[in-house]
Amino acid sequence: MALAALICAYQESDEPGGALRATLPLAGRSVVERQARLAAAAGAERIIILVERLPPDLAAAIDRLRSEGVSALVARGVAEAAASVQPADRLLFVADGLIAGQGHLSRLVEAQGTAVLTVPDQSVDDRFERIDAHSRWAGLALLDGEMLRRTADMLEDWDLQSTLLRRAVQGGARQYALRTDPGDEPPVIAERAEDLDAAESRIVERAGAARGDWASLYLLGPIERSLTGLLMPTSVTPGWLDITAAALTGLAALLFAQGWLWAGLVLVLVSTPLDGAAERLAALRLQPRRGLGWWSYILPALAAAALVALAWALGRTAGWGCLALAATTLAFLLALRGETGAGMPASARFFLAERKGMAWLMLPFAAAGLWVTGLGALAGYAAGSFFWAQRQVHRPRD
């Protein structure tokens, strides 16, 4: 059975000007965009957004979703929403203005039959609809297309959210209590922008939590955070940042080959925070990143070309040994990539040689005028990283 999602987007917020809850800003986008992306990540093949009116900001949010590959349909009424699903479809129902964690949606989708997610009555306010004396609705339910169609036939002037919830509970829907583990994200039903402040802080913090190398954590983290903050409300995509990093690195290789060493090094250093900012931006927008396809090899290949071009330029005066150092560095880096791909945890790779750390390691040698010595240091760093990783991967396990 296919999984669809129905997101309510018709209730007005408490903000001046009659803005909808669905269009309240969250991490550079809107509430409805995050709801749709969470539903898509949970497996929903179609996202149906139930509206009564379509103001420009809501239309723009839906257009962004469609342009980014999310199958978002607009239903101008309950009857149109019901016609968009098949009776046998499983339906993930999302309350208007709700922001919940991905784990809550995944848990509900794994349920059998109809189900509703609940929260303890004393932990939330009246924005969460009461189910009984002890629990309230957490804003998520798993229903089916047939229930939505029957409800649409008898709805009249009643509110869809409340009516669907009552019918699900009266029909024996299984109730799943919201887990209260410290790491769980509490659900929020936003009526004003300030209701989302804590949720946005958690989203931004989580987007930058996983840093896979020492340069990103200790040197580039503040730059990546600032850049991500500037780009959050814009239309800039993570792919644009990837392309910019690749273009700067390729241009740096050309400058190195022409003997403009400092200009090339500056461009390489400028490119280093861009892919990290792209990862953060993708995490904020719940956009999947490219896997091990052809794109993942472009930036490392251009960085390798820049290293060879630098060695070529230095070799004009210092001899062919510079090219030998570059070749040795690249050989160890390729071997290191093979070793670290054998299941080594990310924590064990933290201090190993990689593009960004090696670029910044070259800086103090360049500042002292010791370019050739810097090449030797990079070769030693790559060699040491390889032998350490090899020992970690192949040592006997107790």
Image: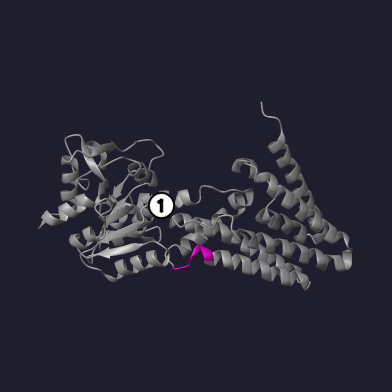
Q: How many marks?
A: 1
Residue drawn 36% across the image and 56% down it: 45
Residue drawn 28% across the image and 37% down it: 176
Does residue 87 lie above or below 344 as drawn?
Answer: below
Label 1 crowd (10 A; few <14 / some 14-19 / many >=20): some
Q: Position of residue 322 (x, y in %)?
A: 84, 60
Res. 160 image quadrant: bottom left
284 horizontally vs 382: left or right: left
177 horizontally vs 311: left or right: left
Q: Position of residue 264 (x, y in %)?
A: 71, 68
Magenta-drawn segment? 235-239
According to the picture, the residue beneath numbered tag 1 turns out to be: 41
Q: Position of residue 220 (x, y in %)?
A: 59, 55
Residue drawn 31% across the image and 38% down it: 178
Instruction: Let me know if residue 351 appears in the view.
Output: no
- Residue type beneath disc 1: Ala
Q: Position of residue 145 (x, y in %)?
A: 24, 52
Res. 107 image quadrant: top left
Residue drawn 44% across the image and 52% down it: 204
